[in-house]
Image (cartoon, rainbow, N blue to C red):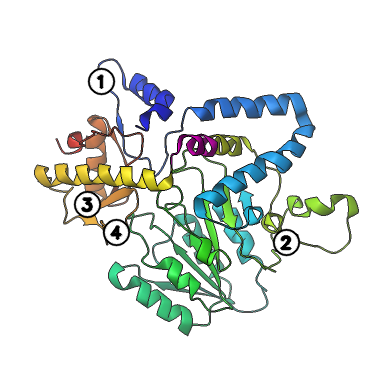
């Protein structure tokens, strides 16, 4: 059904596996997703536009390509204002630009969880070395009470910034009722949803909270456009003035520059500087293709859920010593889980050994210390049983 969009990567993977080895089963799609074939022509188009237009490419890029991509992303997430979707090479740059907007002479209280991705977690540890930064981390487990515990602390603690993942990177567990918590947040608290493992995987409607949250995500994972293109939606009426700001943020005033630093009331408020826009070409080509073909996030999610059910059936029948229900980290497999499963192998050595064993059978996956992650994608065959994971 969906494999037709990924022939180049699927054929390339089979060729690299060697004669007679068969195509590998790529289950690291939550880390690096295969790219649809249309990205090949998109990269060539970016090169040709750059070669033929040189500096003149910036006009069409900012007037046509970026708005078209913003509009397509807005349709995926039901965001009402595409022009408030900021672009950067990575989400870390965007989030730190947001953090930089707070007054450094005053206390900055941040609420988050103990399950955030490495870049944000590391940045917080560094910020905590400053005397005015206070960070409260809510334990993500038990997941059944996470929403209640997080929201209680959010309203109790007088926070300037709250930050939480839509889907936890280490487990695939969906943060329960995160959009609802954001909708009920205190007015003074800026709220960030890290959507990297949710965007283009889980059906996501940001319409009701578009003016309550900053939503960050990127194209490297489930959209399959590769690295180098991330975004952050900006609530309407945002008046924050990032100290970490680049010259792109001044594009609208380049010909009429003043001594004061001004900010536009659109995505340029959080803009940085010059970047490589080849991935934007790829991402736009994918979004346009899927719209033409009627491929939706809802359809993708349903397809992946069916794959996950076949995987669980094979797993239950296999009786594997590590890949089993007892070691599977989850909260609600039927009503909200990301597009990968994580198994706690109890030790890093067991996880490493199992990864190597799977690799020898042509199953490609990744791990985080003792946690082994197995992902599911639309380029997996509709009749894939995943039995070779357990044999």
* Residue 180 is a magenta residue: no
Instruction: State the quadrant of the N terminus.
Output: top left
- Label drawn at residue 265: 2
Picture coordinates of residue 380 (x, y %)? 31, 34
Image: magenta residue range: 286-295
Residue annotated with mark 3: 345
Q: Earlier in the sequence, mark 1 or mark 4?
A: 1
Q: Which mark is residue 335?
A: 4
Cβ atoms at labels 1 and 3 below 8 Å apart: no
In the figure, 20 relative to 33: above or below? above
Mark 3 and mark 2 in contact (Cβ < 8 Å)? no
Q: How many marks?
A: 4
Label 2 crowd (10 A; few <14 / some 14-19 / many >=20):
some
Residue at 62% across, 49% down: 88
Q: Residue furthest bottom?
A: 156
Magenta segment's dominant SS is: helix
In space, the residues marked 4 and 3 are separated at their CA atoms by: 25 Å
* Mark nearer the N terminus (2 vs 3): 2
Q: Residue at x 29, y 28 (%)?
A: 24
Q: Earlier in the sequence, mark 2 or mark 4?
A: 2
Look at mark 1 in the image and give the residue it sits on: 21
- Say which element carries label 2: loop
CA separation, marks 2 and 4? 38 Å
């Amino acid at each position: 059904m969906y494999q037709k969009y990924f022939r180049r990567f699927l054929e390339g993977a089979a060729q690299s596996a060697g004669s007679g080895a068969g195509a590998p089963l790529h289950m690291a799609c939550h880390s690096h997703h295969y790219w649809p074939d249309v990205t090949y022509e998109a990269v060539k188009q970016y090169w040709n536009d750059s070669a033929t237009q040189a500096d003149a490419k910036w006009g069409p890029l900012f007037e046509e390509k970026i708005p078209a991509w913003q509009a397509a992303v807005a349709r995926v997430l039901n965001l009402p204002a595409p022009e408030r979707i900021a672009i950067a090479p990575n989400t870390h740059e965007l989030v730190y630009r947001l953090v930089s907007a707070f007054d450094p002479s005053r206390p900055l209280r941040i609420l988050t969880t103990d399950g955030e991705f490495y870049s944000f977690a590391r940045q917080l540890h560094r910020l905590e070395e400053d005397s005015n930064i206070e960070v409260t981390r809510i334990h993500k487990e038990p997941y059944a009470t996470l929403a209640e515990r997080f929201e209680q602390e959010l309203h109790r603690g007088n926070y300037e910034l709250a930050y939480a993942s839509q889907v936890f990177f280490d487990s695939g567990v969906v943060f329960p009722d995160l959009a609802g918590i954001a909708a009920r947040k205190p007015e003074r608290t800026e709220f960030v949803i890290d959507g990297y493992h949710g965007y283009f995987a889980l059906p996501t409607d940001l319409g009701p909270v578009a003016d309550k949250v900053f939503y960050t995500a990127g194209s490297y994972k489930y959209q399959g456009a590769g690295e180098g293109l991330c975004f952050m939606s900006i609530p309407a009426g945002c008046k924050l003035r990032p100290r970490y700001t680049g010259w792109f943020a001044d594009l609208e005033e380049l010909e009429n520059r003043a001594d004061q630093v001004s900010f536009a009331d659109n995505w340029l408020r959080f803009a940085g500087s010059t970047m490589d826009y080849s991935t934007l070409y790829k991402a736009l080509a994918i979004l346009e293709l899927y719209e033409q073909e009627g491929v939706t996030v809802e359809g993708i999610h349903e397809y992946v859920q069916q794959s996950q059910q076949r995987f669980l059936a094979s797993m239950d029948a296999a009786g594997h010593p590590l890949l089993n229900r007892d070691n599977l980290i989850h909260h609600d497999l039927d009503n909200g889980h990301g597009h990968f499963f994580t198994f706690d192998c109890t030790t890093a050595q067991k996880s490493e050994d199992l990864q190597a064993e799977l690799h020898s059978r042509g199953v490609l996956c990744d791990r985080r210390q003792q946690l082994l992650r197995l992902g599911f994608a639309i380029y997996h065959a509709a009749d894939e049983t995943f039995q070779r994971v357990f044999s």
